[in-house]
Image (cartoon, helix red, strand yellow):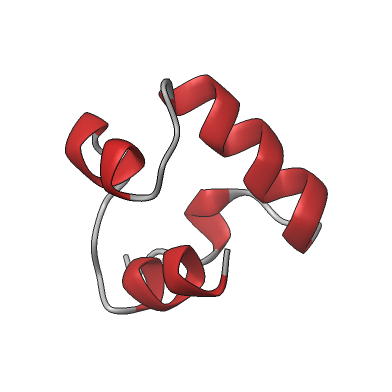
Amino acid sequence: MNLAVMRLKDGEKVTPELVEQLGYKSESAFRRTFKKVTGKNTSEFQIA
């Protein structure tokens, strides 16, 4: 999950490609796990 946080902070968006690279089969599974582990939504880490 640290890799996901770093990539989102670097400006990457949650895309099917990113989700797959991180080992998840769906965006919803990734987003659920991300929220569970970090306590925050992915949008809170993305640069606006």
Q: Quadrant of the C terminus?
A: bottom left
2 relative to 3 in the view: left or right: right
8 relative to 44 in the view: left or right: left
Residue at screen point 28% across, 78% down: 10
Camera-side residue of 25 and 45: 25
The number of discs equals 0
Residue at screen point 74% across, 62% down: 38
Q: Is residue 19 above or below residue 42?
A: above
29 relative to 8 in the view: left or right: right
* Residue 18 image point, x, y percent: 26, 46
Residue at screen point 49% across, 52% down: 43
* Residue 34 image point, x, y percent: 64, 48
Farthest residue, direction left = 17
* Residue 27 image point, x, y percent: 43, 26
* Residue 41 image point, x, y percent: 63, 49
Q: Quadrant of the N terminus?
A: bottom right
Q: Is residue 7 above or below residue 32?
A: below
Q: Is residue 37 above or below residue 3?
A: above
Camera-side residue of 45 and 31: 31
Q: Within the image, what quadrant is residue 25 found in? A: top left
Q: Within the image, what quadrant is residue 7 found in? A: bottom left
Residue at screen point 42% across, 21% down: 26
